[in-house]
Every structure is written in C-alpha cells, then in structure tokens.
Image: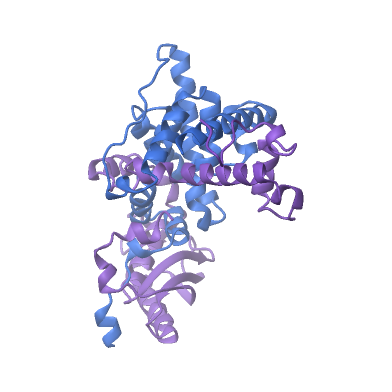
Chain colours: A blue, B purple
Amino acid sequence: MNDLQRTRLPGLADATDAVLAVRAAQGDERAFEMIVRRHGSLMRAYAARILGGWADSDDVVQTAFITAWNKLPDLADGTALKAWLMRITSHAAIDRIRARKDHSSLEDYDAPTPESKSPAAIAENHSQIEALSGALEKLPQIQRQCWIMREVGGESYDEIAKQLDVPLSTVRGALSRARAGLITEMEAWR
Amino acid sequence: MTEFFGLDDFEPRQLDGYTIDDLTDYLERGRTPRDESIESSAGCQIALASLERLRELSRDLLTNESGASAPVSEGWVSGILSNIGREARSGRTIPLQHGADSVDLSITEGAVRGLIRQAGDSVPGVIIGSCVLRGDVTSPGEPIAIEVSASAFVEVPLLETADRIRRVVYDAVRRHTELTVSTVDVVIDDVLLPISDESASDSPSDRNGVQ
C-alpha cells in the first residue's frame, strides 16, 4: 500500500471528460462545475476570437454553458465533449453578432488583446502568433469567422455553413481567400 | 518580401500548376495517397510547410496568448451554476410510505442517483460514472436493478473494489429509500493512472483538460 500513500487518490477533478459529461447529464452539478472550470477559459477565448473582442465573451459563454447543461443528455459520445462545447460556443457567438446587427450600432469592435502574459508568451512562436492574430483582425468578418471556426474550433464546413446560415460554397470561398491572404502574410514574417 | 527559399506569392505558376486549395486538400487527406508530383515540387513543398505552420499557429492561437489556460474566476463559475435549470434532471418520482396516510412523501430519481454517486465515490480510488435505475421505481415493492459504471485507480484491486462499490451503493439505497433492490451491477469501464506527488502541484485541468 506504499504506492497508494505516495500518490494522491483521484477525485472528481481527475475524471475524464466522458465521465463528467455523463454525470452532468444525469444531474450532477459538481461534475458540471468541473466541466466549466476545465473548458471555460478556452471557450471564452474562442468566443472572443469569433466576436472580434472580449466585450461579450463572458455573456456568450454563460449562454453556451446553459445550452450545454440542457443538451448534455443528448450528447452521445462524452469523449467529444470539448469539440461539442466549442460548437455550442461558436453558435452562441454568432447569435450574439446577429443580435448586435439587429441593433445596428456597433461596427468596429476592439481587437482581442491578451489578458495576461503567461510564461509561454515568451516562447519562440509568440511573435508569429501575434502576427497571425493581427492578420486575422484585418480579414473581412466572414473570412475571419470561417477561419476561426475551421482551424481553431475544428468545425466542419457543413457546421460552419449551418451556423453562419450561408451556402457551403460561401464557406469554401471565404476559407480559400482567408488562407491565401494569411499564407502570403506569413511569408513576410519569416 | 522574398527570401532565397521563399516565394513572391503562391500562384499556380510557382506551385507547378497546383493551387493553395489543392495543397490544403492534400494536407487534410494526410498527404495520402502520396502524390509524387506534389512531393517533388520545390514550390509545393514550401507552400505545404507554410500551410502546416499556419494551421499549427491557428491551433495555438487560443491556448498561447489569450489567457485560455488561466483559471476562471469563482464568481464567474457560480454565476453559470446559478443559471442552470435543475428540475429538468429530477427524473421519476419515487414514493416513500410513511406512517401517516395523510402525508405524501417522495424522493426524486435524481436525488437517488445523487446518493448512489456519493456512496460510490466514497470508495477510495473510485469515481462513479453513470448510474441507472431499471424497473418501475414509482410502484412500491417493485424490484429495481441498479447499474453503475466507475473509473478506478489502477493500483486498487479491481474485483474487491467493484464489490465494495456494490455494497456501499446497496446500503445507501436501502438506508435512504424504500426501493427493493434486486441487483447492483458495477462495471469498471476505465482505469485511472497514478498521480505522482511531483505533478500534484499542477492543476488537474492542465493534465486532463485541453490537450
């Protein structure tokens, strides 16, 4: 039993996403809280990227988590929890952008700026990420949204088309133009 | 900006007739089946390397610079938790017979699942997963089968542990409800690896959460 004494026994915080998902689906709020702690920050950052600023990202993620809680019983594969949450987040973010347009006031949003500098921030590729971030800000909104959902969120072309309510060909075209623009800029960062 | 290994742009004439989109499709197919004309083209190789780097940077976009690994604030977490609807998960209503006929007492299926989870989690090295009550829980005396799945720490003896889970679950349900439990089935469907002291200071979300 020496080994058991030397090592910490696992608690709910060590549970896999699949376990947390099934427990939350069956009403376990503590499991849901672990999901919020584990994925909340990433969802916030993802929302901010799609929204083009941090302004509404907290609200959007709150909405996304409420949707997630309600729909968890329908999630068939708990191991896909993270991708599923990312999809719900982009959906909530797109809804928010539509709502803004209905109020037809805001056109320019503040660019997402890093909230805190982590030690990783001084890593070698940091400046390239900054450059990519800047290049993305310059893209037309549809191109930026498609790129973020595809390459950051890992969503399929179909999902993106559905979420943005545009034809698949529009998504393909936007991604193609975004790619061409970004890759050409990237050559200049070398 | 052009360097000796770079390209002015990524036009098909520099990519031996391929477009950036062709090369993206090729990358997304995992570069299989291998296409010699792409693999032997210097222009395509440069473009493929750039595309891969671009995808890599895009994936890092959230995790590296946006505070995505920073812990969320307590107020934010409790704000979310206070907004979720609990009633939706309460399940069936399980009657409790009590001395007085005039008093209607019951417990929800959700609450019973909660106490089963709590009992199972109390077994050292165990995290309960799903928990299902089979049978008509709304009719007193009907036999009920309980199915529980669990993750177990790799260093605990599995058979003994499954048996302990079965016993604590059975006891908890008997103590707190009037359900007639016919069987408690325990499936250990995942094994958890040891968490060493050295990594104990890491936040668990770093290890288990986002890759």
* Residue closest to the eye, A46 or B102: A46
User: Quadrant of residue B206 in the image?
Assistant: bottom left
Query: What is the count of numbered marks?
Result: 0
Is residue B31 among what the camera can see? yes
Is residue A153 among what the camera can see? no
Left or right of A133 on screen, residue A153: right
Check the image and report above or below for B142 versus B138: below
Q: Residue at x 47, y 70 (%)?
A: B148
Check the image and report above or below for B209 versus B64: below
User: Quadrant of residue B16 in the image?
Assistant: top right
Q: Residue at x 41, y 79 (%)?
A: B154
Q: Residue at x 49, y 52 (%)?
A: A81
* Residue closest to the eye, B198 or B193: B198
Q: Where residue B174 sits: x, y (%)?
A: 37, 73
Left or right of A88 on screen, residue B106: left
Check the image and report above or below for A123 versus A61: below
Q: Where residue A36 sits: x, y (%)?
A: 36, 48
* Residue closest to the eye, A51 or B100: A51
Q: Where residue B132 sits: x, y (%)?
A: 49, 64
Q: Where residue B140 sits: x, y (%)?
A: 46, 66
* Residue closest to the eye, A80 or B49: B49
Where is the C terminus of chain B found, in terms of image quarters?
A: bottom left
